[in-house]
C-alpha cells in the first residue's frame, strides 16, 4: 500500500514532536514506576502499626497521642474507648475521630493496636510519689527518674531549685520556684525563640498549667509548664530531645501523667479555703450581686459554649488559697470545660 506523499513526508513539526516524545516518555515512565512502587509499599505496610508521622490528630489542649478520650491520661479507658467503636466509620453515630488514629475514616484493630502499644511503653503502676510539705504539693514520677543534685548556678536570685530528676537516656526534669508575682503576661520571658505569644493553657485534671514548647531553628527546646502556687511561679521543665527539637512522644506521655498527678497537699491551707458552697446565694438581681457570688452561681461560666471561651474566664482572685469576694484577674482560669457533660460544658472550677 502506498501512502500519500503529504502523510509520509518528514516535516519540521514531525521532527519537533518526535524529539519531545523521545525526551518526555522516559521521564513519565520513571515517575509512574515510582508512584506504583509507593502504592505497593503502602499496601504492604497497611497491616502494621502506623507511625507517628501519618498525620495522627493531636488532642486539643494536650500532646498525648494516645489520650483518645481526652482525660489527659493514657490508660485502659482509652483502649476501652476504641474497643467500643471498632468497625464504626465516619457516617456512623458511634464514630469518634479521636479513636481513628490512622485517619482512614474507619476505626479498626489497627487503631487499637497503635494505642495499646504506645500506652504499654510507659508503666504507670511502678511510679513513686514526690511530696514537698514546705510548698504544699506532690506529684508522681516514674522509677526511671532518679533524683540528682540540683544545679546551684541559677539565672536569678529569686529562683529556687526544688527538685531535679534525670534518666539514663538523657531526660531531665527540673522543678523550680520563682518568687515573682504570677501573671500570664509575665511568663513571656520564658518563651522560646521565635514565639513571643502568651503560653498555651493546659488543664490536667483540676490543675491549670501554662505551656511553652519548641521555638524556631533546629535546637532542642524543653517543654516548660508553669502554674500558680500562692501567687508565685512554679515551673516544670522537661528536657531531652531525640533527633528532634522537642522531647519525644513517649516523654510527652510521661510529662502529661506527671502533671495529671500534681495536687496541693497542705491540709491546713486546704481546710481554710472557702469554696463556692460557702458563698451566700442571694435572690437579688444579677447586677446587685458581687462578682464572686455571680461567678459561683455560674453566670460567668455557664453561658460559654466553646472550650476556648470557657478557659479564658478569669474573674476571681485567689490569694493564700482564698477566694476574694471582688473582681480580679490572677492569670488562673476560673471555669473548667467538661467534655462529657450533655448539657452545660463550662462549669465553675471551685466547688
Image (tube, rainbow, N blue to C red):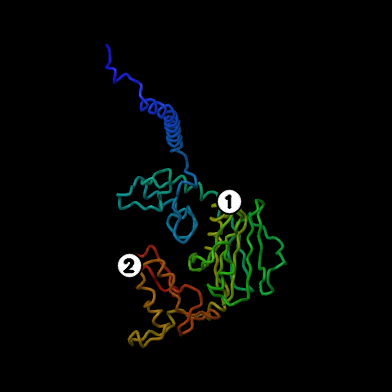
- Up-down: is 322 above or below 89? below
Q: Residue 275, relative to residue 120: is it above or below?
A: below
Looking at the rendered image, the quarter that the C terminus falls into is bottom left
Residue highlighted by disc 2: 343
The answer to whether residue 109 is above or below residue 177 is above
- Categorize mark 2 by other alpha carbons within 10 Å: few (<14), some (14-19), many (20+): few
- Total number of numbered labels? 2
Nearest to the eye among marks 2 and 1: give it.
Answer: 1
Q: Between 169 and 120, which is closer to the camera in this rendering?
A: 169
Which residue sits at x=33%, y=64%? 342
Say which of 31 and 12 sits in front.
12
- At numbered mark 1, what does the secondary structure look like: helix, strand or loop? loop
User: Is tag 2's residue or tag 1's residue first in the polypeptide sequence?
Assistant: 1
- Quadrant for the N terminus, please: top left
**Real-space CA distance between mark 2 and mark 1, rounded to the nearest whole angstrom:** 42 Å
Residue 12: x and y in percent read 37, 26
Q: In this view, does 8 lie to the left or right of 255?
A: left
Amino acid at each position: 500500500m502506498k501512502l500519500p506523499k503529504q502523510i509520509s513526508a518528514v516535516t519540521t513539526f514531525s521532527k519537533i514532536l518526535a524529539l519531545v516524545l523521545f525526551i518526555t516518555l522516559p521521564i513519565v515512565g520513571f515517575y509512574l514506576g515510582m508512584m506504583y512502587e509507593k502504592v505497593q509499599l503502602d499496601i504492604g505496610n497497611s497491616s502494621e502499626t502506623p507511625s507517628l508521622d501519618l498525620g495522627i490528630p493531636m488532642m486539643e489542649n494536650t500532646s498525648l497521642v494516645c489520650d483518645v478520650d481526652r482525660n489527659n491520661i493514657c490508660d485502659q479507658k482509652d483502649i476501652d474507648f476504641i474497643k467500643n467503636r471498632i468497625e464504626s466509620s465516619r457516617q456512623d453515630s458511634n464514630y469518634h475521630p479521636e479513636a481513628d488514629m490512622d485517619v482512614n475514616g474507619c476505626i479498626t484493630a489497627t487503631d487499637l493496636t497503635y494505642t495499646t502499644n504506645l500506652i504499654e511503653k510507659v508503666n504507670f503502676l511502678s511510679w513513686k510519689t514526690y511530696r514537698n510539705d514546705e510548698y504544699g504539693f506532690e506529684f508522681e514520677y516514674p522509677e526511671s527518674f532518679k533524683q540528682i543534685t540540683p544545679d546551684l548556678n541559677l539565672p536569678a536570685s529569686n529562683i529556687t531549685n526544688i527538685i531535679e530528676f534525670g534518666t539514663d537516656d538523657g531526660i531531665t526534669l527540673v522543678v523550680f520556684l520563682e518568687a515573682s508575682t504570677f501573671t500570664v503576661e509575665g511568663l513571656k520571658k520564658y518563651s522560646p525563640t521565635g514565639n513571643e505569644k502568651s503560653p498555651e493553657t493546659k488543664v490536667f485534671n483540676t490543675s491549670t498549667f501554662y505551656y511553652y514548647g519548641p521555638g524556631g531553628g533546629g535546637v532542642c527546646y524543653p517543654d516548660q509548664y508553669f502554674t500558680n502556687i500562692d501567687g508565685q511561679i512554679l515551673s516544670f521543665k522537661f528536657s531531652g530531645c531525640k533527633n528532634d527539637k522537642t522531647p519525644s512522644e513517649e516523654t510527652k506521655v510521661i510529662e502529661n501523667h506527671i502533671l495529671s498527678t500534681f495536687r496541693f497537699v497542705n491540709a491546713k491551707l486546704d481546710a481554710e479555703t472557702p469554696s463556692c458552697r460557702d458563698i451566700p446565694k442571694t435572690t437579688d438581681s444579677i447586677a446587685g450581686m458581687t462578682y464572686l457570688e455571680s461567678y459561683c452561681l455560674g453566670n460567668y461560666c455557664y453561658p460559654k459554649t466553646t472550650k476556648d471561651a470557657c478557659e479564658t474566664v478569669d474573674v476571681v482572685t485567689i490569694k493564700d488559697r482564698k477566694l476574694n469576694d471582688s473582681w480580679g484577674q490572677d492569670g488562673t482560669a476560673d471555669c473548667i470545660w467538661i467534655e462529657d457533660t450533655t448539657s452545660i460544658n463550662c462549669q465553675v472550677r471551685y466547688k
